[in-house]
Image (spheres, helix red, strand yellow):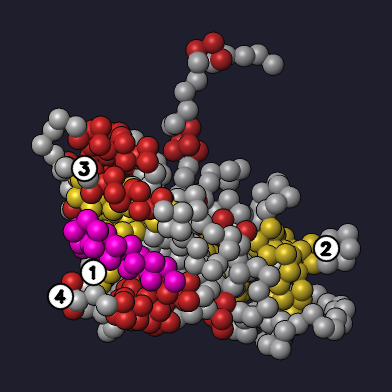
Amino acid sequence: MKPDYERPVIQKLNTGLLNKFGSRTEQRPVKQIEGVAISDLMDQYGSPLFVISEKKIRQTYRRALKAFTMRYPKVQFAWSYKTNYLDAVCRVFHQEGSWAEVVSGFEYRKALGNGVPGNLIIFNGPDKSTEDLQMAVDNRSLIHIDHFDELYALIELLEGTEKRARVAIRVNMDTGVYPQWDRFGFNYESGEAWNAIMKIVTQKNLDLEGLHCHIGTYMLTPGAYSVATQKMCELAQATANRTGVKVKYIDMGGGFCSSNTLKGSYLQGVDVIPTFDDYAEAIVNTIMHFGFRPDELPLLILETGRALIDEAGSLLGTVLAAKRLSDGRRATILDIGVNILFTSFWYNHRISPAQEFTQHAEEMALYGPLCMNIDCIRESVSLPLLKRGDRVVIHEVGAYNMTQWMQFITLRPNVVMIDTNGKVHLIRKNETMESIVEQECLPDHLKDFTL
Ligand SMILES: *Cc1c(COP(=O)(O)O)cnc(C)c1O
């Protein structure tokens, strides 16, 4: 068979730009996900298309859980809804034993809708309306208080009733990683967290059940968790010593890295990120050495988000055009824009062609379909030659994209999940003209016009 014609390429030789692993991001085409052909997926569900592997979620979750349970007797994960709150995804985590961690009334209701018992929902975040607080009190949920105004609202709500609320405070602190996240919760070093604790324990209908922190996201240093755990333990001990209230749990939040590569990083994420074992070692060692009595060890709660779901998600797309920029660089335009791949602002996402290619590679910019200059998926990546109609796979997109995506210029695509038997399920339908317009209301006087 005669080989297909492929246009010639001219390559400028650059020195000193590559790291020691060279520039090729992917050596082989990726033609299937969990045994399902990418061409079949795209023929049936369109392009672009988000694909989630249920098997990968379960494997990753079990790996994380094991890293902690083999070191510590009392561990509980709570699924961070904002990381990916598609019901099918949440239910995989709940089937695995995860509680729910939510940060708004909307997410709270979504967790209830998924069948999570109210007492296993952790309600975080700065945005809890009085109505949300009432709902959380009535359901016996764990309310993680973010600021004094929320505390006062809760006290007011319970005034004159027999009801009790189960609460914790969110603590922010210096962990040696900057910029420090100090906009959420009560500060440790200034004594504000202590003030909040004193206010809570002197209220007759508030039960201080735990202490919570969430020190950042994509934390590259496990040592920051040692520092944070130490401060949380100290706060728990001071509370017990001075007020007699022994908190039942310490919640270390989320923040573990997924293996994605941050922009500007010299090495691939997979080569530099800590493992679940590294994080578990840092956290558990600190608690174990702190000096709790064995029968008084607190429950350790983790709200890990991105590290549990990123790898399970892929985004399939199609090449719309290959063109040349005025300075001679190559540009490839995909049907995947930053509106559906929000994380391309932070990550150098790994991208693979979904069909065979030759040995030639080119440095190129990858743009999305939006008529907006910011719509760039990769500023510069070395990939085999791509032409209109070719298909690509963007790897590790499971975290934050399916919640932060927006309807802008184009419509949001289908999301499918491949179950552990290789069966494909549609778990979120693509938007249509009708589903968008349905939300709009047109005033009568604007209904008619003549041009
Ligand atoms: C976002 C968030 C998480 C999850 O964070 P990751 O960095 O994705 O692990 C956990 N807890 C709270 C309070 C959050 O806001």
Calculate the distance from the C-alpha at mark 2 to the C-alpha at mark 4.
Answer: 67 Å
Residue position for label 2? 324
Calculate the distance from the C-alpha at mark 1 to the C-alpha at mark 4.
Answer: 9 Å
Q: Earlier in the sequence, mark 1 or mark 3?
A: 3
Calculate the distance from the C-alpha at mark 2 to the C-alpha at mark 3.
Answer: 68 Å
Is 54 drawn above or below residue 27 in the view shown? above
Q: Nearer the viewer, residue 88 or 32?
A: 88
Q: Which residues are magenta?
A: 227-250
Q: Earlier in the sequence, mark 4 or mark 3?
A: 3
What type is the residue that disc 1 sits on? Pro
Residue position for label 3? 203
Q: Residue at x 80, y 75 (%)?
A: 7
Place of residue 249 in the rendered image (x, y in percent of width and height, measured from the top left): 25, 64
Q: Which residue extends farthest bottom?
A: 20
Q: Which residue extends farthest left?
A: 162
Q: Residue at x 16, y 42 (%)?
A: 204
Is 340 drawn above or below residue 352 in the view shown? above
Residue position for label 1? 298
Q: Is residue 282 magenta?
A: no
Residue position for label 4? 295
* Main secondary structure type of the part rendered in magenta: helix
